[in-house]
Image (tube, helix red, strand yellow):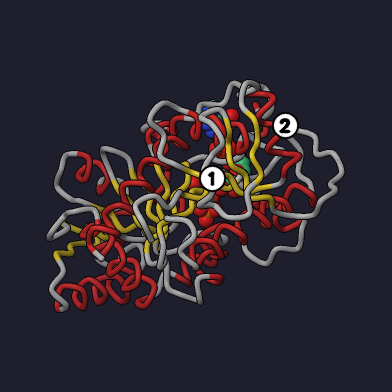
Amino acid sequence: MSRDTPLAVTLGDPAGIGPEIALRAMIAKDAPDAVLFGHRVFAARALALVAPDYTLQIVNDPGEAALSDRHLRLVETGAKMVAPVPYGAVSQIAGQAAFDAIRAAIEAAMSGRVAGVVTAPIHKEALSAAGVPFPGHTEMLAHYAGGVEVVMMLANDVIRTVLVTIHVALRDAIKLADFDANMRAIRLAHEGCRAFGIEAPRIAVAGLNPHAGESGLFGREEIEIIAPAIAQARAEGMDVSGPWPGDTVFMQARRGQFDVVVAQYHDQGLIPVKYLGLEQGVNITLGLPFVRTSPDHGTAFDIAGQGVADPASMMLALRHAAAMAEAARAGA
Ligand SMILES: NC(=O)c1ccc[n+]([C@@H]2O[C@H](COP(=O)([O-])OP(=O)(O)OC[C@H]3O[C@@H](n4cnc5c(N)ncnc54)[C@H](O)[C@@H]3O)[C@@H](O)[C@H]2O)c1
Ligand SMILES: N[C@H](C(=O)O)[C@H](O)COP(=O)(O)O
């Protein structure tokens, strides 16, 4: 892959804010070179909304040069004809269009035709309505990248968190946060932080129960599952501590005590990151054979199509992807 290989940006769910923030991020000053993947109709609708002075340039090969600095290259995905998709509503067509773009971008990344994939938000109910058997990007990416082990990291300038379990019912998360899942999250958090230039990452592992179980008074997962995983990781040479109470571990990380917090379930890890401001966070999939980032927010159906969505997190996702792709090239 050469220095000039562009990133792929997927349009996201066309009923949401994905297309408009994707385009805004791509045309922002000093934006990394990127090619859009998605349906022509939805790309054109977003262009008319946020960048009417730009023209779509349909390309077969993402490496094709843009005709001018007012052309946005689009790799067309999905069926030629689609029914209209209103903003702000779950639809099977929107879910299918979102899926088609992601699938094509993954293929392009796997064959080295793009330097990485930056995904605009999708709606999980729409994906499901389209019969897509994955709850989110992360699971889809892991599958089409060959069944590799991945974890979700969310990061801003203040804290990083890696999740042991993601898109499952809380009841199931408690069962799924087992020894192996903790080991996977700790190992990939370690490798991911090292790839970001942190030589010996200080990893904190959050407990599952209130006050990390209070020595078994409020649950035994810390004693029977999490502490043994921490001991194993330490034996493998990683700087890992815990289980820390989930209600204070992010405050400690914010003070600089840890480089990354491993959280047992989705909201334990994502509330602290998103609370600091959606515009500051980036979602990064660790463990893939290529770079993938995304904004830290969803489809925002309540404001879609109004042209008011903040593209800041999408812009950060693009910049992070470019920096990670460059670091991977330099280290290769
Ligand atoms: N990267 C992704 O694909 C991704 C990430 C998170 C959520 N989702 C999905 O998105 C859908 C909607 O999720 P939700 O409603 O829980 O969260 P959401 O992030 O879409 O919206 C939460 C609130 O934040 C606001 N908001 C979000 N992004 C904004 C932006 N860029 N500018 C201004 N305001 C913004 C919304 O208007 C809303 O009030 C769900 O299906 C969810 O699973 C997808
Ligand atoms: N859990 C993520 C969040 O709340 O920001 C979001 O659902 C996106 O997940 P994927 O990247 O797997 O689609």
Q: Which quarter of the image is occupied by the C terminus?
A: bottom left
- Give residue 136's position: percent from left, percent from top: 58, 57
Quadrant where the N terminus sits is bottom left
Q: Position of residue 59 (x, y in %)?
A: 63, 48
Where in the figure is residue 41, as x and y percent of width and height? 76, 39
Q: As displayed, is residue 28 above or below residue 263?
A: above
For the point 50% across and 52% down, the residue is 63
In the foreground, 252 or 325: 325
Q: Is residue 285 left or right of residue 146?
A: left
| Towards the viewer: 194 or 69 | 69
**Mark 2: amino acid:** Arg
Q: Residue at x 38, y 48 (%)?
A: 321
Q: CA distance from mark 1 to mark 2?
A: 17 Å
1 or 2: mark nearer the eye: 1
Q: Which residue is mark 2?
A: 45
Amino acid beneath label 1: Val
Q: Nearer the viewer, residue 167 or 133?
A: 133
Q: Secondary structure at mark 2?
A: helix
Look at the numbered disc 1 and give the secondary structure of its residue: strand
Image check: 245 left or right of 16?
left
Quarter holding residue 89? top right
**Splitting the image into 4 quarters, where does residue 204 fall?**
bottom left
Give the residue at x 79% y 46%: 91
- Mark number displayed over residue 35: 1
Considering depth in this image, is 155 or 233 the residue closer to the camera? 155
Q: Residues within 10 Å of mark 2 (few under 14, many from 20)?
A: some
Q: Position of residue 165 (x, y in %)?
A: 45, 63
CB under 8 Å between callouts 1 and 2? no
